[in-house]
Image (cartoon, grey):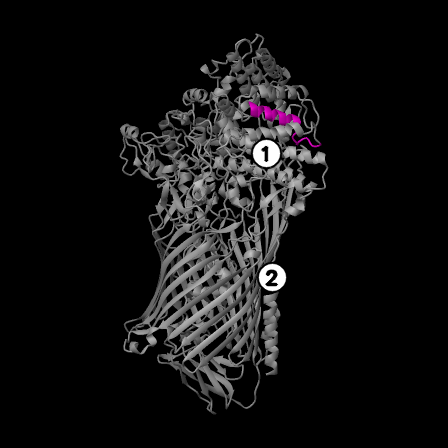
Amino acid sequence: MKRNSIYITVLTATFTFMAACSDSFLEEQPRGVFSEEILINRQGVEGMLVGAYSLLDGAGGPTNDWFAAASNWVFGDVTSDDAYKGTDAGDQIEINPIERYEPLPNNGYFNAKWNHQYDGVSRSNDVLRLIGDVTDINENDRARLIAEARFLRGYYHFEAKRMWNNVPYIDETTVSFSDFNSAKVPNNQDIWPDIEADLMHAYDNLPETQAQVGRVNKWAAGAYLAKAYLYQNKFNEAKPILDNVIANGTTSDGQKYALNEEYHHNFRTEGNNSAESVFAVQNSVNDGGNALNSRQGDVLNFTYTGGPGGCCGFHQPSQNLVNAFKTDANGLPLIDTFNDEDVTNDQGVLSSQPFEPHTGNLDPRLDWTVGRRGIPHLDWGPHPGSSWIRDQVYAGPYSPKKNHYYQSEEGVTTDGSSWTSGYIAMNNNLMRFAEVILMAAEVEVEVGSLEKAREYVNMIRARAMNPDGFVKNPDGTPAANYVIEEYTQPWTDQAMARKMVRFERRLELAMEGHRFFDLVRWGIAAETLNEYLEVESTKRQYLIGATFEEGVNEYFPIPEQQVILSSSDGQPSLTQNPGY
Amino acid sequence: MAWLFVIAMAVQPEVYAQERAISGTVTDQEGPIPGVNILIKGLTRGTVTDIDGNYTINAPADATLIFSSIGYTAQEVPVNGRSTIDVELAQDVQALQEVVITGYTAQNRRDITGAVSVVKPEELLATPAGNVQQQLQGRVAGVVTSGTGVPGAGAKIRVRGFGSFGNNDPLYIIDGVPTYNVNNINPQDIESMQVLKDASAASIYGARAANGVVIITTKQGKAGVPTITIDSYYGIQQAPEGPDMLNPTEWGELTWESLSNAGQTPTHPQYGTGAQPRLPDYILAGNSSGVMEGHPDTDPNLYNIDYNSPRHQIVRFNKEGTDWWDETFRPAPIQSHQLSINGGTEASRYSVGFNYFDQEGLMPHTGYTRYTVRANTEMKVKDRIRIGENLQVSYNEYQGSNSGENGGESFVLNSVRLMPFVPVYDINGGWAGTAGAGAGTASNTPGELFRAKDNRRTAIRTFGNVFAEIDIIEGLTARTSFGLDYETRYEQNYRFRTYERAENINTNSYTERNDYNLNWTWTNTLTYQAQFGDIHDITVLAGTEAVKETGRGVGGRRLDFFTDDPLFRVLDRGSPVGQDNFSYGYAATLASLFTRVDYSLMDKYLVNATLRRDGSSKFGAESKYGVFPAVSVGWRVSGENFMQGVSFIEELKIRAGWGQMGNQLNVDRENAYSFYRSTPGNSSYDLDGTGNTVVQGFDMDRIGNPTTQWETSTTSNIGIDAVLFDSKLDVAIDVYNRVTDGLLLRAQAPGTLGNATLPFVNIGDIRNRGIDLMMGTRGEIGANGLRYDVALTLSRYVNEAVKVGPNPNDIIQGSVLRNVEITRNTAGQPISSFYGYIIDGFYETQDELDAGPDQPQKRVGSWRIRDINEDGEINADDQTYIGNPHPDLTAGLNLTVAYKSFDFNIFLYSVVGGDLYNNTKWWTDFNSFQGNRSRRMLEQSWRPGADNSNAVLPILDATDTYSNNIANTYMVEDGSYLRARTIQLGYNLPDAIGDRIGLSNLRVYVQGQNLFTITNYSGVDPDVTTLGPETGMGIDMGWYPNPKQYLVGLRLSF
């Protein structure tokens, strides 16, 4: 039995050991991540602020790809009279009902955009929530970090506000991560005051220049604050700020705000952070981020085959937009009659068949905005028409152009890591100085200073008139019959002045994601878009039967998923927008 | 561990003096029995009978011989100085007599009180496949299996329905070592397999048992003369026929009609403009598309596909049409060769196996090859001490592209939707593609497969354990086992530039990655077994177990390789610009205490109870431990006196059990922790405006939950086992109710919380109720030696999500494909229910149209969508549940007929009543992506003025973007099918001949797999019922089809 007692001793020891050591044995920390405690210091909150900035590009948080594109091409352009979804009927099929003003609340695009905006808010709040506990920071840096974070929080809310109007406002004290119900905030308050408060705090506290060009500064915050006022028709509040920004504003790296000499410079990677760039998404490629930091929101918006990018022919300009670039003998836009006759196009003409482009007067900005048959497409040669278009019957003869890169930049400002080279380093201009001037022009019209408004609009037109900035044929001649002049007659009729400012805004900022939101804030979405649909549906049959319902389609449906997720005890805290 | 094997082989037989040769014949009532083991009691030597039941052995005159053979009651015979001993063995009439390994112990099958299915290895091996999962289909009642034809791929196994929204994989215990990965375990090494289906059988595995436990024992050595077995088969696999697609002329007609109906002048970059489509001669010539012979760009001298100069590809228009399905699939060989050596003495036994398995893919340049070595040994080192080891080492290699394995937009789908007018090659032998205008987006499948031919994924896996057993006192045995599972994987993936596509890849790249996981399991048990008279029989087990899994991985990618030559495929030959690298690591642990009591009273009343306490690193401090009890009882009715008169019942047992099991598969290892991350893509930003670098940033990655607990499945099971009519009929019926509480779901929160990954929390309940039936009958027909064996398994379960969140109206979205939401999960419905609109025919006339509700894009010939809430408007509120993939019944029928040396076997598998959502129709029946269309679309679309009684699709309309943007009843089909999984004809060499040439066994056979399938399902392969994520199953995304196979096989031993 002696041997047995040895066995039993060993066994008992084994069992005891197994039972006793299990507590430490059962601790396995995750690898390669940071606890909050490690990040409560200057570098940590600086990094969190970088994280908040990193969502400006519309990707890298809850959604990648194009659903929350910084350019707003779906929600701002396809929904307007500027652009079609493009490509063919079946690709990104969920945009179709958005374009036809029949969006359903369960459309994934809305949920993606919603989640993206509120992740931006959440990341901004992380900075604000933790910075109070940070001790290794001087007060200047603390103030700057808070102001930058509040600007971003205001900016992300602003986007949500103009998408859905009835949206919740989340600050750094709203959400407790141990109680998810705390995030079920109702959307029954107007959050403009909160957005204004954030932007104003940023305007009052941000430095005029920053150590890094990608950071927001006082002037950009001011421009956004003014924009927020414009959305509420608070023109008197907007005016002094815009005056100040125009008179004194500089970029974060200290360049005095100015219009670039050539219009096209705004749509080149080499024009990133020019003097006209008030606030931009800093896109980058080949940075180890698998193209997630590139301008990926627009990756689909290239020519279909051949030409830049290689995919997929989305975001095609409308005929209506192209027609808007016609000018009269005086080089002025045909504000009321532009759509009576179409700019000649190659609809139904194969690339192998001959075609002569439009010979009438055109605003030169057209050919930096729209890719069309026969016009040199950057350095890619003349646009060949239908062979660069995926389905001309469905979506017309035009390509987008503002986000297109030069062939000579292939591999340099394009990312090689993914399935197309359409992941590019060109910044998204969220706010160009041209827009600041045009906002100022709007304000002047509304406060009655029509001549000041004309002066502003002429600044924009004067730049567009620079013949050095025209699209040129290889022999140096202008690629089309560009005729453009300033408004030389004094403006005396406020209603007409308003139209002219708005028309100028459309031309200057076309295809940059503004148009739909502008139409809504001007209160003319229903009339403009229904008129547009009536004519455009004769060209784009898939628009037949589509109507813009006034009082409904100004705002998008609150994502159904969010309504469901906002429920406590079966009662949602989010209320669906009217009409959905 | 291999040293143990070497030692075992080196043990020399003991030599004793004063022995004499003893010989004799072993018989049963019917004649001689081959293969009977004869051991000398107390010694470690033995022999086996030959084919005629004869044996010879040297033994001391006073020895006792032990005769044993499976299916017979063992006999001990004292030699008493005799030199001839003939023995007649009694057949063990109890079919349930066999000993099976269940949780940590072996049990007499007839004493089992839980729901346990025993699977015969030969049934598994009847299906030639690389892994046991594929082979399980239809063999076990209560187990549902779906798999694809991807070479070497596993299959999805579900035991008794779906108890979770996440992973429902069963736990496999191979030679005592747990794993979830049986993909590279060689099926030919399996000696026995048991599926533990209810809590009373499985809950001894506690926190990992809720999805069922599959116990596998690999082949063990047997005392006796060494036997060498060779088992080989070779076959050809063939893809099923592809869907019926259009030729180029028909495609043009369809397009023209579709454009005309949309009120548009028909035009197409290839087919021209005009009243009729015209076929061009070239898809592409330089920058010109759809041109005719004579066009200047078609000059072959201009041809150039070099990447470094302006491209000028010339591709003919294939007027006859390319059958892309045929171009994508090819007949492919499958083969397996197994060599097994088995032998040993009473003191030292060994079993060794070598296997080569090779399955080429149905798609060219793909395949799977595996080499495995198994070496199991067991030794008696002292009177009361045994040690041993089980070891399997495998090398696995997957060749070529792995696209197509996961359904989705894979090569399978590509080969369906590629335009028929695109040829495989251009005029110069380059790949043709979609570069010509109007040629769609699908890539040239043969081209892609060729380019990927040098891609490799390899895995080396070492799996096994070492163990020691000590008999401490009579009946008390201690056992310790240390198991190890180490797998390291290597992957090389090269991506080519393309020139032939509409959307070309302009940069080549190369990715290389390596990872490993290392899991160990240390198990210690004490077992006490005692009998008290014939009244009490008790077995008590207590044990501890510790499990640790760890792993790391590393990889990188570079771009812009100077040449595509395979020899240059090392990372640092690529450009440093845009390089990317990563690594990661993880660890998780489990520590457990468990006990089990089996008690039998008078061999009639059986009680079993188990209790396990698991602690897991996956849970936070507040809920680290879970306790899982189970109890079951059995009543052997046939043992009662009052049953003695019922002659047709040999064995009748009623069982009932209740118990709880856990599931921790669906919790991330880091679930309890909150933390931030830093990644270039998600949290960093180019603050400096450089265009090519980012500043490091942070964002919240995860919110932890320290209170999350195990999913708990509570099962109740009532079963009956019966052996009837002279052992001719076996029946096992089980009825169960399985309720999973505290279902682990990722917490959901509104977007306003931010985007950190939310923890899994216990918020759902799922119920599965069902019935499993297994029936077997065997016997002879007449007296002429015609034998039959029929086995039937029937399974039915009813699944219902009882609760999916805190609110009754909560939903869990399932599969969303191309922005169309297809499945939903909500309380009161089975999981993965299809959610969409109901189609009630068509709007036949304008009047009907005007009277109908508002429906987007409606016109005469549109589908009439049902206005479910009758509000006069078709919108999201009119969606409802339109089907689900859960079958009403699955059945397997195995029928064997043998006559003299021939036998014939057929195994039929059937699924009855489940729906499938045939999403391949999204690509082929609508204006979805440009691509080829189905014959259905051409011939069964509604047409004005035509007989539309067969119409299933709306009027062809190029601008219809609505019909394919909604999930609807057209896409839902009955997924019922009956498939001949196996048909085999075999010939066994008669013993007399075999004996003469020294073979103890020789069998040759021919076999066909999946030879026919009877179904109304319109897709290529209906065996997709449970494929896809649990919340979005049953969607046919164009999965890799199961091939037909034709095989010849040989099995011989000597």
Disc 1 is placed on an element classified as helix
Find out whether the residues at labels 1 and 2 contact each other: C-beta distance under 8 Å.
no
Residue B730 shown left or right of residue B565 in the figure: left
Mark 1, Cα crowd under 10 Å, few <14 / some 14-19 / many 20+, is: many
Residue A531, position as x, y percentages in the image: 43, 19
Query: Who is closer to the viewer here, B991 or B3?
Result: B3
Name the foreground residue: B802 vs A369: B802
Task: State the predominant SS element of the stretch in magenta.
Answer: helix
Give residue B672's position: percent from left, percent from top: 57, 52
Identify the image quadrant of residue B375: bottom right
**Identity of the amino acid at label 1?**
Arg
From the viewer's perspective, tell me whether residue B336 is left or right of residue B141. Answer: right
Tell me the subunit letter for badge 1: A
Which image quadrant is residue A492 in?
top right
**Residue closest to the eye, B748 or A285:** B748
**Is residue A335 placed above or below B978 in the rendered structure?**
above
Q: How many labels does the image show?
A: 2
Quadrant that contains the N terminus of chain B: bottom right
Any mark on residue A153, and which?
1
Residue in view at x 41 percent, y 61 percent:
B715
Residue interval drawn in magenta: A211-229
Residue A409 x/y as whole percent: 63, 30
Residue drawn where x is 67% and y is 37% of the image: B693
Q: Distance between the residues labelled 1 and 2?
A: 43 Å
Task: Tell which of A69 and B746 is nearer to you.
Answer: B746
Report the residue marked by disc 2.
A23
